[in-house]
Amino acid sequence: METLTGVVVLLGVVVVGAALARRLGLLAPIVLVVVGLVFSFLPGFPTVQLDPELVLVGILPPLLYVAAVQTSVPAFRFNLRPILLLAIGLVIFTAFAVGLVLHLLLPTVPFAACVALGAVVAPPDAIAATAVARRIGLPRRVVSILEGESLINDATALVLLRVSIAAAGGTAVGFGHIAGEVLLSAGGGLLIGVLGALLLGFLHRRVKDPLLENALSLLSPFILVLPAEYLHMSGIVAVVVAGLALGHRMPTLLAAESRLQMNAFWRLVTFVLEGLVFLLVGLQLRDVLRNLQTGWVTVAWATLAVLLTVILARFVWLFPSAYLARLVPRIRRREPALSPRFPAIIAWAGMRGVVTLAAALALPLELANGTPYPRGLFVWLAFATIVVTLLVQAATLPAVARWLRLPPDDTTADVLSEAAVQHAAGRAARERLDAHADGAPAAVVERLRKAIDDRSNAAWERLGGEGQETPYQAYGRLRQEMIDAEREVFRVARDEGRIPEEVLVEAQRDLDLEESLLRRRTER
């Protein structure tokens, strides 16, 4: 009962914190982390000890899965070079930079152990990057690169963490050992992801019930991650690969009703899990401080050194990697000219999150060879990196984006492309209608032709002058008034006993679907 009460309290705090963030115009991750920091010292508030395995196997996989499903595969493929440079190259560079700086400050701690901490703090968080970048409306290519980086970098960091811990414990680590770890972890995860995508795609094609498809979707990340972890392969790679493959094929795998329900379902799951993640990060402060046994002078210098290294390493890596690659003619022809403002905003968007804390808590109590190392200090450094990057970088990211004056996406080009494709879709629909219209009432055929014209016209109307109400917007405004009137008549009829509850529910569902479509199209 106490566990259930604690879960309900945490969920309540997440809902209130998210509502407060929207009310104040702040980012929900920042508000929830601050709330967690405060509540960690509140007498009587449930004590929550974060289990690293719960985070890495229970919370992270569904969040990565839905992020991968929603990621554009063409955009991911187009930005693959910068994504890999960040997700693999930058993680390794940051890990060794942090390891070197920390070893200079703490020469008695093995260099490999210091690199292990570097691997812990190296990867920006998938949840934080996506939540913040989309919330403040960064350019589409920047968001694609940040999302792609955050999908892969955790796998790189966890492999490097395992190798570093083994080396710190006295195991001889050479190129062969590292290559074997990478092949087993990443290659095995890739194989499981491909096989899992084939299996799940087959099941989605056979299952037609929307509720069962939602249940299958919820189970999918765990179907992928559990065998991967059991075989000591990368569950993260497996989840991401399968999510990308299934998301790209989603329009043909699922029926319309299943897609609508699944989108709403995963929005709720993502909201709850993301909120819990940031709240749980803040709630760890009391335990982290309790286990810190290093002198405060050393703690202060180490914290400052690690924070500066983590932040500066991203800038040091990003600018050369962004521009030196353009010396290659093929890359220069393929990719558009890059303004320095883009690598600057990507460099500043290096927020760390719960994976960093989970990896730190998973550090062994002592090294395999018995060599002592300050585990409590390492956990504190990871925690401080998360909190500072969230409260400083995430909080100032909107202001930095405005200061840099990033060129916005060309919405006119987007609308033109959509209108052109909609016109082609309308032509295909009209041809299909003509091919199957034999025997249908003429009034029905004419009504369907008018619906095709209305959809095509609505797309072109969006190119009209701003501030002017388009015909489709006028239609949406007036139709909304009509829907409200219809809904009220059905409610009164139910209350007076003229129709049963089931009739109201069916009518309400139809009206709700039409209203949601109206709002989506008129608010764009």
Image (cartoon, rainbow, N blue to C red):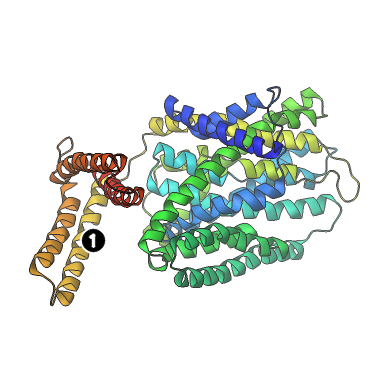
Residue wearing tag 1: 421
Image location (x, y in percent) of residue 410: 28, 46
Quarter of the picture holding the N terminus: top right
The residue drawn where x is 38% and y is 47% is 140
Q: Nearer the viewer, residue 153 or 358?
A: 358
Circle 1: element type: helix
Please, which residue is most extreme toward the front here?
Answer: 497
Image location (x, y in percent) of residue 208: 43, 68
Total label count? 1
| Residue type beneath disc 1 | Val
The residue drawn where x is 68% and y is 52% is 158
The residue drawn where x is 37% and y is 59% is 257
Image location (x, y in percent) of residue 129: 51, 43
Residue 145 in sight:
no
Quarter of the picture holding the C terminus: top left
Q: Is residue 345 above or below residue 172?
A: above
- Tell me the quarter of the picture where residue 360 sits: top right
Please, which residue is most extreme toward the right here?
Answer: 370
Residue 303 in sight:
yes
Q: Is residue 90 above or below residue 22?
A: below
Q: Is residue 37 above or below residue 269?
A: above
Badge 1: residue crowd in 10 Å (few <14, some 14–19, many ≥20): some
- Tell me the quarter of the picture where residue 229 sits: bottom right
The residue drawn where x is 86% and y is 44% is 366
Image location (x, y in percent) of residue 310: 62, 38
Left or right of 107 in this view: 93:
left
Left or right of 463 in this view: 492:
right
Q: Nearer the viewer, residue 116 or 253?
A: 253
Q: Nearer the viewer, residue 386 or 354?
A: 354
